[in-house]
Amino acid sequence: MNYELFIARRYLFAKKSHHAINIISGISVLGVAVATMAMVVTLSVFNGFQDLVADLFTAFDSELRVTPKDGQTIEVKDKDLLWLKQSDVVAVFTPVLEGQALVVEGGKQQVVTIKGVADNITKQGHIEDILYGDGHFCLHADILEYGILGIQLAQQLGLPANFENPLQVYAPKPGERVNIGNPLSSFNHDELQSPGVVFMVRQAKYDANYILTSLDFAQRLFDREGRVSSVELKIKDGLKTDKVKEQLKAQLGERFKVEDRYEQQNDVFRVMRIEKFISYLFLSFILLVACFNIIGSLSMLMIDKRQDIQTLRSLGANDSQICTIFRLEGHIICLAGALLGLILGGILCWIQQEYGIVTMGDSEGSFIIETYPVSVYWTDILLILVTVLAVGWLAIWYPVRYLTRKLLTSA
């Protein structure tokens, strides 16, 4: 331990001639600790909401999705897709065809997204967990085609989970102009029966717009026989999604996009990341204000230790070394506040995770969850620690240098 750090540590813990200096130093530590604690809690709550949204999408979105970069459909027997289907990293290969269609029921009309999938869609995740109703998951049986509606879409059409009359579905024929004399001749028409269930992802993007049905139905409706718009993949257990994604990107080349769940919902998570970053910036400014309290504590300490400064100069300490002593004093205060804030923030997050003290509101059932979700990431903890130390250094460096020079000049 060099002597500057030794003296700075002694100044922090030693009793001062004026008791107010000890109090101000304690307030400085507490101010940094509270700002640090606020950063830990706030960022952890954003993490909690991000994890919550990711969990909600898990049952509907696949681990990886492969789509043509040109946005067009592709032959299901394409050589790259055949290779993908036989790849030793893929556990479940599910061809998908999506498109816009018009549904008509009892005078009500709604433009929806038809998502036709292969029968092995149930092996992609836990789609049965988001189904509600007295029926069961079924896409087709003999000549009947079934459609599973999002719960909000069913409500908009005034349909129960087990509707009796078949749902009329229309899709424009590719490349044809609308015949004014007989508009229906320009549309493909088919019917969907009810399997007695609806799905609820708790996201309006799906619940209010999607109908899940068989791949054959979608291919007939959109005149896309033997073609798909994407392929959903479930990778084998024990493999890391990021590594498999990069491996598939390298193999498939420039023709395809390979997206994980977060990239599939990039708009949602981008907004959440921006909100989290803005909150981080605001809290960093609050932290900067809290660090200015340290300057007051150090200025009073310099005045209190004026005789010690003369002694150090007599012993051979130069002005730079004396300035370093008080600067280290400020860094120690900042570090102590940061560590205290991290501990307190971690404790508060643990209490919220275990007991859910802070609730979302008084109306039970109005929200997806009843209490604020919290997830503590070690990367955030490291970022907060670096931020506190960097902000503290910026807040302390020039004022301490200026005050030290002024004090030494007058001495």
Image (cartoon, rainbow, N blue to C red):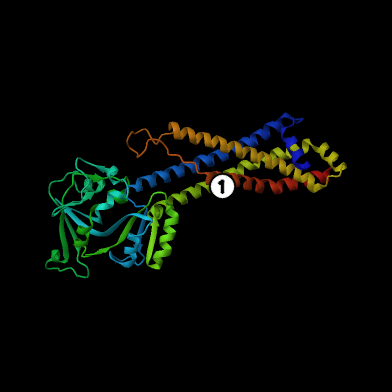
Residue type highlighted by circle 1: Leu
Viewer-closest of 338 and 409: 338
* Residue 354: quarter of image: top left
In the figure, is residue 290 to the left or right of 112? right
Question: At 38% from the left edge and 62% from the top edge, which residue is drawn?
Answer: 257
Q: Which residue is mark 1?
A: 383
Viewer-closest of 314 and 383: 383
How far from the left and from the top, in percent, is residue 4? 77, 42
Question: At 25% from the left edge and 59% from the top edge, which residue is drawn?
Answer: 100
Residue 317 visible in this rendered orientation of the protein: yes
- Which part of the image, by quadrant, shows the N terminus? top right
In the figure, is residue 304 to the left or right of 220? right
- Which part of the image, by quadrant, shows the C terminus? top right
How far from the left and from the top, in percent, is residue 134? 19, 40
How far from the left and from the top, in percent, is residue 17? 77, 30
* Residue 403: quarter of image: top right
